[in-house]
């Protein structure tokens, strides 16, 4: 569908495309804008939500402005669902940060706050189900457990 918007651009679309960022297939709508006419025309692909916001505000958005979907559904392009944010604010909204958990160290007994990623990597690295507060405690706890297991295996043995 060809239309001409407020800024004199020829606009084709909207089209639904599947963006494949980091292995995640996510549908989104886009439009193709032509600036100029004839062979000198420049083509630019633009998010449909951004184009709708520009038309509703009757101005072009600056480079540091992004359009955010309140309900995180990229196919819901209702104008009430869209709002303008800075790029940094949009990133902070969609990526809240690491997941923190409280743990009690199996070696020293200290209660600490650690990221879930750190705790899981210690469990994987030392092949244990215990939680440790640091690499040092994880290493000492692992070697202590290994030593006590080896001792318990030899206690029942009788020598000839």
Image (cartoon, rainbow, N blue to C red):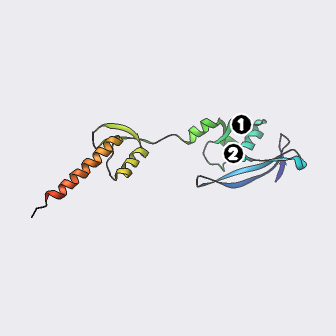
Above or below, 90 against 22 in this view is above
Q: Which residue is mark 2?
A: 78
Q: Quadrant of the N terminus?
A: bottom right
Residue 113 placed where, x, y %?
38, 38
* Depth order, front residue of 157/127: 157
Res 107 quadrant in image: top left
**Direction from residue 91 to residue 67 in the image, left or right:** right
Which quarter of the rendered picture does the C terminus lie within? bottom left
Left or right, 104 with respect to 159, comes to right
Q: Is residue 156 left or right of residue 10?
A: left
Q: Residues within 10 Å of mark 1 (few under 14, many from 20)?
A: few
Asked which secondary structure carries label 1, the reply is loop
Give the percent coordinates (x, y) of residue 144. 25, 47
- The picture quadrant where one finds residue 136 is top left
Mark 2 vs mark 1: which is more N-terminal?
A: 1
Q: Nearer the viewer, residue 160 or 102?
A: 160
Which residue corresponds to the image point at 73% horizontal and 40% vertical from the top-left?
Answer: 53
- At x 18%, y 54%, the residue is 151
Asked if residue 146 lies left or right of residue 160, the reply is right
Q: Farthest residue toward the bottom?
A: 160
Query: Distance from label 2 to label 1 (Cα)?
Result: 22 Å
For image coordinates 66% across by 48% down, the residue present is 76
Residue at 72%, 42% in the rendered image: 50
Q: Position of residue 106 (x, y in %)?
A: 28, 44
Find residue 82 and report its horizontal and vertical position in percent: 67, 41
Circle 2 Cα neighbour tier, 10 Å, few/some/many (<14 / 14–19 / ≥20): few
In the image, 140 versus 68, the foreground residue is: 140
Q: Which residue is mark 1?
A: 63
């Amino acid at each position: 569908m060809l239309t001409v918007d407020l800024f004199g651009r020829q606009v084709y679309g909207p089209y639904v495309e599947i963006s494949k960022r980091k292995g995640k297939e996510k549908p989104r709508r886009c439009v193709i804008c032509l600036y100029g006419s004839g062979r000198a025309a420049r083509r630019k692909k633009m998010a449909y939500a951004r184009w709708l916001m520009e038309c509703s505000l009757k101005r072009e958005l600056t480079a540091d402005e992004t359009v955010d979907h309140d309900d995180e559904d990229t196919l819901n392009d209702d104008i009430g669902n869209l709002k303008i944010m800075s790029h940094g604010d949009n990133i902070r909204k969609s990526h809240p940060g690491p997941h923190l958990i409280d743990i009690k160290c199996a070696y020293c007994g200290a209660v600490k706050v650690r990221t879930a990623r750190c705790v899981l990597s210690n469990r994987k690295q030392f092949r244990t189900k215990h939680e440790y507060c640091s690499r040092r405690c994880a290493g000492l706890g692992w070697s202590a457990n290994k030593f006590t297991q080896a001792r318990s295996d030899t206690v029942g043995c009788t020598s000839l």
